[in-house]
Image (cartoon, rainbow, N blue to C red):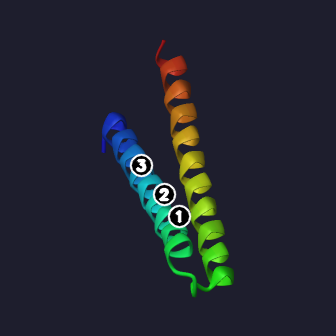
Amino acid sequence: MRYPSLMSNILSIAAGGISAASNRFEASAKRVAQDPKANIVSEVVEQKMAGAAFEANIAVVKAANKMAKSVLDILV
């Protein structure tokens, strides 16, 4: 596998993870806002898990960018 293709795959997977985490957080927030009988404890846990997933995927993007910079530094 060529490096640009690998980087593209990594960033694509991370972007998908960011989107999924954002959607999970938004869905939980809507349940809390719209349903007075929503289980607040489980929704807080869901929101914390979505936040952690978001942060983990951001870390992947940062690591991929750092790797790309390292490769460019080697090539230049």
The kind of residue on which mark 3 rests is Ala
Identify the residue at the far top of this view. 76
Query: x, y (%) of residue 22?
Result: 48, 57
For the N terminus, the image quarter is top left
Q: Position of residue 34 (x, y in %)?
A: 49, 74
First along the sequence among labels 1 and 3: 3
Q: Which mark is residue 22?
A: 2
Percent of width and height locating residue 17:
45, 57
Helix, strand or loop under label 1:
helix
Other residues around mark 2 within 10 Å, as few (<14) / some (14–19) / many (≥20): some
Please tell me whether mark 2 sits on a helix, a strand or a loop. Answer: helix
Which mark, by number, is residue 33?
Answer: none
Of the residues shown, which amino acid type is indicated by label 1? Phe
For residue 73, side relative to residue 27 (left or right): right
Relative to 27, is 2 above or below?
above
On residue 25, the disc is: 1
Q: CA distance from mark 2 to mark 3?
A: 11 Å
Q: Nearer the viewer, residue 68 or 41?
A: 41
| Within-10-Å neighbours for mark 1: few <14, some 14–19, many 20+ | many
Give me the residue at 46% from left, 17% from top: 75
Q: Residue at x 57, y 32 (%)?
A: 66
C-beta proximity under 8 Å, tags 1 and 2: yes
Quarter holding residue 29 = bottom right
Amino acid at circle 2:
Ser
The residue carrying mark 3 is: 15
Work out how far the residue at label 1 is from the one at label 2, CA to CA, in angstroms.
5 Å
Q: Say above or below: 7 vs 15.
A: above
Binning the other alpha carbons within 10 Å of mark 3 as few (below 14), some (14 to 19) or many (20 upward) gives: some
Mark 1 to mark 3: distance in Å?
Answer: 15 Å
Q: From the top left corner, tell me how far across and down residue 35 is, in percent.
A: 51, 80
Please state if 11 lies on the left or on the right of 74 as rendered: left
